[in-house]
Amino acid sequence: MQRGFIRTVVFIVILIIIIGFFGFDLRSIIESDVVQNNLKYAWSGVVAFWENILREPTLYIWNNLFKNLIKEGFTTGIGNIGSLTNGGGLQLPSVPLPMSQ
């Protein structure tokens, strides 16, 4: 997964270098009124998509699944730390070791 991310970053850098080689100024392109209006229009579409389609299912999944998983994992971890500080040992599953011949 990280390999794909690095490839993407390298590809973008090479693309920017090639665009600059052909004389295009990315700053002036991005700051132009036409591009700014297009970006604002696209962003309003993203916001509308979030508000009308993705928001409710995402919040349901977050509030009913992930929040509880994070809370349980955190409280279990704190409980393990508490048992260590009170003289108790950390409960780990026993795994048989292979016997050497």
Image (spheres, rainbow, N blue to C red):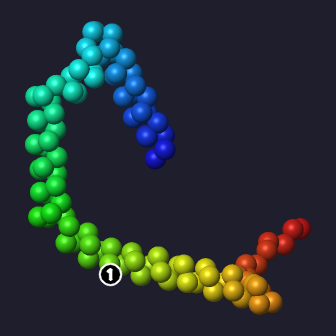
Residue found at the very far top of the displayed protein? 22
Q: Residue at x 12, y 57 (%)?
A: 48
- Residue 93 in sight here: no
Q: Which residue is drawn at 69% across and 86% down?
A: 82
Picture coordinates of residue 93, whole percent (x, y): 69, 82
- Residue 62 in sight here: yes
What is the secondary structure assignment of the residue under circle 1? helix
Q: Which residue is drawn at 84% across and 72% down?
A: 99
Residue 13 found in image quarter: top left
Picture coordinates of residue 65, whole percent (x, y): 36, 78
Q: How crowded is mark 1: few (under 14 residues within 10 Å), some or many (20 or more)?
A: few
Residue 79 found in image quarter: bottom right
What amino acid type is highlighted by mark number 1? Answer: Asn
Q: Residue at x 19, y 64 (%)?
A: 54
For residue 93, side relative to residue 35 (left or right): right
Of 97 and 32, the residue lying toward us: 32
Classify 1 as above or below 64.
above
Picture coordinates of residue 55, whole percent (x, y): 20, 67
Picture coordinates of residue 50, whole percent (x, y): 18, 60
Classify 81 as above or below 34.
below
The C terminus lies in which quarter of the figure?
Answer: bottom right
Classify 89 as above or below 56.
below
For residue 3, side relative to residue 96 (left or right): left
Tag 1 residue: 64
Classify 44 as above or below 23.
below
Residue 97 found in image quarter: bottom right
For residue 13, side relative to residue 23 (left or right): right
Number of on-image labels: 1
